[in-house]
């Protein structure tokens, strides 16, 4: 597709930045791209959003073979767009064995499980920290709460979790990277958006039926139609 587009130091530096940060809002990503161009691009042309999109496309063509990609994600809890560096491996947490101890990784899995199983996929922050007790049940020394707090902050910066109003959510990176893992391990609780058929964790709920839909999907749908796609009653929830 882009055989004639050269893969430059701008591509390399942007990929490095994405993999280091894990998750970047689109404006953070663009600012980073502008800074990288100033450092590596001698052409002195003014970088545009479209240039960034084609740089990301070229990067994705390269890293696809390593089961990685930079995905653009609309994240409904904050109504923001993020670029997320994603590993599409079967079980991406196992890749972190060098970085985190066994009880720390166990805490991560328990957090994922509890967020997957909770009805609205959120947990009170205090409940998250209490999950450290769960690490003791497996014959491991329980994780100290202070360490758990540090880990939550670290994982939040990478985009695995997100706290809003003292509640913990699956972050933009987890929603994409662990979609397969969660839908395979917790198949009973996973629902799909009936408009795009992708697993949905957060979105907007119909006022008349239990259906949850991605805000973006529902916005597009309401340009043509006025009823809930599931129960057919007039859509009344503001988007
Ligand atoms: Zn959808
Ligand atoms: Zn409905």
Image (cartoon, helix red, strand yellow):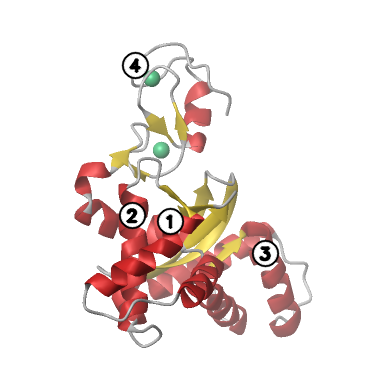
| Residue 34, x across and y down, in percent | 72, 71
Camera-side mark, 1 or 3 = 1
Q: Earlier in the sequence, mark 2 or mark 4?
A: 2
- Cα distance in 3D space between marks 4 and 1: 35 Å
Ligand 2 is within 8 Å of the C-beta of the residue at disc 4: yes
> Which element is circle 3 on?
helix
- Residues packed near mark 4 inside 10 Å, few (<14), some (14 to 19) or many (20 plus): few
> Which element is circle 4 on?
loop
Residue at position x 40%, y 41% in the image: 120
Q: Vertically, is 213 above or below 234?
A: below
Q: Earlier in the sequence, mark 1 or mark 3?
A: 3
Q: Which residue is mark 4?
A: 231
The quadrant holding residue 153 is: bottom right
| Residue 5, x across and y down, in percent | 54, 73
- Residues packed near mark 1 inside 10 Å, few (<14), some (14 to 19) or many (20 plus): few
Q: Which residue is mark 2?
A: 114
Of the pair 110 and 87, the residue shown nearer to us = 110
Which dot marks residue 127? Answer: 1
- Cα distance in 3D space between marks 3 and 2: 30 Å
> Which element is circle 1 on?
helix
Left or right: residue 173 versus residue 103 is right
Which dot marks residue 16? Answer: none
Residue 171 seen: no
Left or right: residue 98 versus residue 33 is left
Tag 2 near tag 1, CB within 8 Å: yes
Q: Which residue is mark 3?
A: 28
């Amino acid at each position: 597709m882009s055989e004639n587009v050269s893969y430059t130091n701008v591509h390399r530096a942007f990929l490095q930045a994405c993999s280091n940060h894990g998750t970047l809002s689109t404006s953070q990503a663009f600012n980073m791209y502008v800074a990288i161009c100033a450092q590596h691009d001698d052409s002195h042309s003014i970088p545009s959003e479209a240039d960034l999109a084609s740089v990301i496309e070229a990067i994705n063509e390269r890293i696809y073979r390593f089961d990685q990609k930079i995905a653009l994600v609309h994240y409904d809890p904050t109504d923001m767009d993020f670029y997320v560096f994603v590993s599409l491996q079967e079980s991406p947490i196992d890749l972190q064995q060098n970085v985190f101890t066994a009880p720390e990784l166990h805490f991560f899995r328990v957090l994922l499980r509890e967020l997957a199983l909770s009805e609205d996929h959120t947990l009170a922050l205090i409940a998250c920290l209490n999950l450290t007790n769960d690490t003791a049940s497996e014959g491991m020394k329980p994780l100290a709460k202070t360490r758990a707090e540090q880990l939550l902050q670290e994982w939040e910066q990478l985009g695995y979790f997100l706290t809003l109003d003292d509640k913990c959510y699956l972050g933009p990176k987890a929603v994409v990277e662990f979609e397969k893992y969660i839908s395979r391990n917790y198949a009973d609780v996973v629902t799909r958006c009936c408009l795009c058929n992708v697993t949905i964790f957060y979105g907007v709920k119909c006022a008349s039926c239990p259906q949850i839909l991605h805000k973006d999907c529902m916005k597009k749908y309401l340009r043509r139609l006025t009823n809930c796609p599931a129960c057919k009653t007039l859509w009344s929830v503001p988007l």
